[in-house]
């Protein structure tokens, strides 16, 4: 009997525990479980209202008609079960003074979400002017390779031409002259030190050249096998176009160019869809011929003013594979990213990072290079994106050794980090012409 | 000894029974809590996914998105929207037996948007590109937030009067409404209907309506009214026509290619909509809209007018083809096809960019029958017209799914 009583006591204890748990566990209402994202909705409405300056105009207006129109637009934009209250605050000396508000609420409602939005008076003009990039007091020319007779590699999903256009839009405001190099014959003229436009501001000397073709570099026909300059472009003994990469390195040094490689292993292929029409890169892309690691090694020899030699040593490191980690922005990169308003992802996969001090095959010591403007923190001496400037002050390689596909914003950021042009922000008319708009929302009805 | 054993047996049995009962009770509480967690996760996923769709750029390969790099966030590219395979209408094959399938948005007997499926993005592809195939089902709907309705339509001699009601959440007053009246003013020497147009503006009163009266217009044959309203910087659009059909149906426009703007104009009989294959004289007129929504008539290319019949050895055929000139493909427009059978006049309209006639679109699967559907909404602009984008999301995996867990397309 005693055991049965004890069992009964145990059951009683468990029952009390269950009742207590059931009482304490308060499951949320369905609306709380599956809420509408009212903040996001409010933001889209304010943003769309201000898409052509309407909200800014009304916020500074005393006209009852304008405020009525704003209220009508708000009511039309929000579902019927949403209560709202929009208040405009004037910002004076750090204090927020309410100026006017509209609402569809009579009585008291507990608003659950609010979103704030800063508007500027239509009378104010904000303007930014970018400092032109210069060197030794001379404005530089930006060349973007856009050759129609070349194919890209490791730029999957893009074409060199679309990348060229995006780079043009991103960077042209920072350069006095920006020129698209539309064919390999124009590129040949550059290699000869000739201007390719009639623009009097164009200057081949000290220019910046961005190769939008990824791991491939356009090669003019003259430098291809059988061309009049084949001795400067083709290594007959090794059957390799590493010789052209060497010539390119020499030219970079001669004209003090900054050569920008936007993704992957620099100078891994050469490309010309006419002269190399029957060649393919082992992946079925014709008009491209593989050079391999010898291309970059030859380029660096040229940049370091050494004699040509064929060296096919693989020197880059796959940080993602070998170290099992992503590369992270440097603090300077974060700052410059905000400063220039260019926002690539701060964490990236780097499979072609170049070796600097402390890493095997260190190119900084071997080729007299100084590593500058690192976009990503180095990993064991490997740099995922940085500028390798020759100590002589003549020529530099900006190498973005990230994994495909390219984010050209990283290349743009690397270049801007190297030159650090200023952004001059100008405001016309009187200061204090901003107002804060706060939209509060609450969902009514339902459970 | 025996009573102790019985006591032991009774106590153990009672305890075991009680144990299982409480196990069941506790597990129900835990299960409910888990379900709530799943549902909350679904709501979060729904919000993320909606932003993902609205903010991603649809011109990038491997991306499903309706945003545009050249537009501000939450402004959708009208062409990407047009390329969504509609879930609201059944797919149409034209010509019958050809295997060419069209996505179908049909709002009435005279309102069509038929886009070839090969140019559209399918629900399955969207799921793959969003990375949710096999995990979640969704339905995206885009609905205009401002509606314009017509009432009190009166034709009297050479005049037409009507009322336009403007509604958002409620009646919208003090809004400027502009009505464009496109009417069949006669037939040309070859018997094709000729369209003329005129317009007028008025402000909505406190009740949210505005009255219009057009005089010296021939509305006896057929007409189409396109009304627009501007509220703040949002546009709303509404339209109505006198009659869509003749006794031989009307002419149905199919977009053959969005890229080059070719449009097939087919006899409704050939689309298997009507039994009567009577000859129809048609005239297709195209209007592009400028930034102020003013209509500009544009000369179409190809067979913009002609005769359609049952194509049995007579002149004419069951369909013809016309084309929007290339320079106007990037602008919003309205195609109006008027047709005549004797003294009967029909009309069909087709938007080039859905916002020009305020078409709604539903894309994706069918949420009905799902155990739990999370929804979220955003406001978006399509060519200046305010739309509400609503995403319904449900899980195809996990405890919350009842039934087979399969996904169904509408």
Image: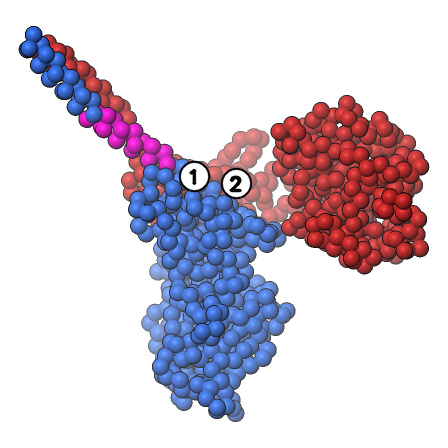
Chain colours: A red, B blue
Real-space CA distance between mark 1 and mark 2, rounded to the nearest whole angstrom:
23 Å
Q: In percent of the image, x 46 and y 60: which residue is there?
A: B85
Residue A136 at x, y percent in the picture: 89, 37
The residue at the far top in this view is B1
Q: Say which element carries label 1.
A: helix
Residue bearing mark 2: A117
Q: Is residue B391 visible?
A: yes
In this rendering, is residue A107 above or below B68? above
Q: Give residue B44's mark.
A: 1
A384 displayed left or right of A313: left
Q: In percent of the image, x 38 and y 70: which residue is there?
A: B108
Residue B264 at x, y percent in the picture: 51, 75
The C terminus of chain B, quarter of image: bottom left
Question: Which chain's residue wears label 2?
Answer: A
Magenta residues, start to end:
B21-38
Identify the image quadrant of residue A407.
Answer: top right
Q: Main secondary structure of the magenta part?
A: helix
Report the mark closest to the observer, 1 or 2: 1
């Amino acid at each position: 009997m005693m055991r049965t009583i004890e069992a009964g006591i145990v059951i009683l204890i468990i029952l009390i525990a269950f009742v207590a748990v059931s009482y304490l566990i308060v499951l949320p209402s369905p609306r709380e479980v599956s809420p509408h994202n009212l903040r996001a909705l409010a933001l889209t409405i304010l943003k769309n209202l201000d898409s052509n300056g309407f909200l800014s105009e009304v916020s500074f207006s005393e006209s009852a008609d304008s405020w009525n129109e704003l209220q009508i637009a708000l009511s039309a934009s929000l579902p019927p079960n949403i209560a709202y209250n929009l208040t405009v605050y004037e910002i004076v000396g750090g204090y927020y003074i309410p100026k006017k508000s509209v609402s569809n609420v009579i009585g008291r409602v507990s608003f659950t979400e609010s979103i704030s939005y800063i508007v500027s008076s239509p009378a104010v003009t904000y303007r930014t002017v970018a400092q032109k990039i210069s060197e030794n007091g001379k404005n530089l020319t930006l060349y973007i390779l856009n050759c129609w007779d070349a194919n890209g590699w490791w730029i999957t999903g893009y074409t060199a031409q679309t990348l060229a256009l995006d780079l043009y839009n991103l960077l042209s405001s920072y350069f006095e002259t920006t020129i698209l190099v539309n064919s390999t014959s124009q590129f040949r003229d550059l290699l000869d030190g000739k201007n390719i436009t009639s623009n009097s501001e164009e200057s081949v000397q000290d220019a910046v050249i961005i190769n939008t073709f990824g791991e491939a570099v356009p090669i003019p026909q003259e430098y291809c096998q059988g061309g009049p300059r084949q001795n400067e472009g083709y290594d007959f003994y090794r059957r390799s176009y590493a010789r052209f990469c060497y010539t390119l390195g020499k030219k970079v040094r001669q004209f003090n160019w900054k050569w920008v490689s936007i993704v992957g292993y620099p100078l891994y292929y050469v490309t010309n869809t006419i002269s190399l029409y029957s060649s393919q890169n082992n992946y079925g892309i014709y008009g491209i011929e593989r050079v391999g690691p010898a291309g970059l090694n030859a380029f660096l020899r040229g940049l370091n003013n050494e004699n040509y030699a064929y060296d096919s040593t693989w020197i880059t490191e796959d940080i993602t594979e070998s170290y099992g980690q992503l590369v992270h922005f440097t603090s300077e990169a974060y700052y410059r990213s905000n400063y220039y308003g260019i926002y690539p992802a701060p964490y990236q996969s780097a499979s072609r990072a170049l070796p600097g001090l402390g890493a095997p095959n260190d190119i900084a010591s071997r080729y007299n290079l100084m590593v500058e403007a690192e976009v990503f923190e180095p990993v064991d001496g490997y740099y995922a994106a940085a500028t390798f400037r020759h100590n002589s002050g003549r020529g530099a390689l900006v190498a973005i050794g990230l994994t495909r596909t390219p984010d050209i914003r990283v290349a743009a950021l690397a270049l801007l980090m190297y030159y650090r042009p200023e952004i001059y922000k100008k405001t016309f008319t009187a200061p204090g012409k901003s107002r804060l708009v706060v939209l509060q929302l609450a969902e009514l009805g339902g459970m | 000894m025996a009573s102790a054993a019985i006591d032991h047996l009774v106590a153990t049995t009672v305890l075991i029974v009680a144990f299982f009962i409480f196990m069941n009770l506790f597990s129900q509480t835990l299960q409910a809590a888990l379900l709530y967690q799943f549902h909350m996760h679904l709501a979060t996923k729904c919000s993320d996914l909606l932003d993902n769709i609205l903010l991603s750029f649809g011109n990038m390969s491997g991306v499903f998105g309706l945003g545009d790099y050249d537009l501000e966030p939450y402004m959708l590219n009208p062409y990407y929207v047009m390329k969504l395979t509609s879930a609201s209408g059944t797919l149409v094959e034209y010509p019958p037996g050809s295997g060419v399938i069209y996505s179908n948005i049909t709002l009435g007997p005279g309102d069509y948007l038929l886009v070839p499926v090969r140019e559209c993005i399918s629900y399955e592809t969207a799921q793959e590109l969003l990375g949710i195939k096999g995990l979640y089902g969704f339905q995206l709907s885009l609905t205009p937030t401002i509606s314009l309705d017509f009432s009190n339509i009166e034709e009297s001699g050479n005049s037409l009067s009507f009322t336009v009601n403007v509604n958002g959440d409620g009646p919208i007053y003090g809004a400027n409404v502009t009505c464009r009246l496109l009417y069949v003013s006669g037939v040309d020497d070859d018997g094709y209907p000729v369209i003329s147009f005129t317009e007028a503006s008025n402000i909505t009163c406190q009740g949210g309506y505005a009255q219009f009266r057009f005089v010296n217009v021939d509305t006896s044959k057929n007409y189409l009214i396109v009304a627009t309203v501007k509220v703040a910087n949002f546009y709303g659009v509404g339209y109505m026509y006198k009659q869509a059909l003749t006794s031989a149906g009307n002419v149905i426009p199919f977009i053959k290619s969005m890229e080059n703007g070719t449009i097939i104009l087919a006899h409704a009989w050939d689309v298997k909509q009507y039994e009567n294959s009577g000859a129809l004289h048609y005239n297709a007129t195209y209007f592009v809209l400028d930034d102020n929504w003013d209509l500009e008539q544009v000369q179409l290319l190809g067979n913009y007018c002609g005769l359609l019949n049952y194509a049995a050895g007579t002149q004419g055929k069951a369909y013809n083809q016309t084309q929007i000139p290339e320079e106007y493909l990037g602008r919003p427009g309205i195609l109006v096809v008027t047709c005549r059978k004797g003294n009967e006049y029909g009309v069909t309209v087709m938007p080039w960019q859905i916002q020009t006639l305020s078409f709604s679109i539903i894309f994706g699967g069918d949420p009905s029958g799902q155990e739990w559907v999370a929804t979220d909404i955003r406001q978006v602009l399509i060519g200046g017209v305010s739309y509400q984008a609503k995403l319904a999301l449900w899980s195809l995996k996990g405890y919350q799914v009842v039934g087979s867990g399969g996904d169904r397309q509408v």
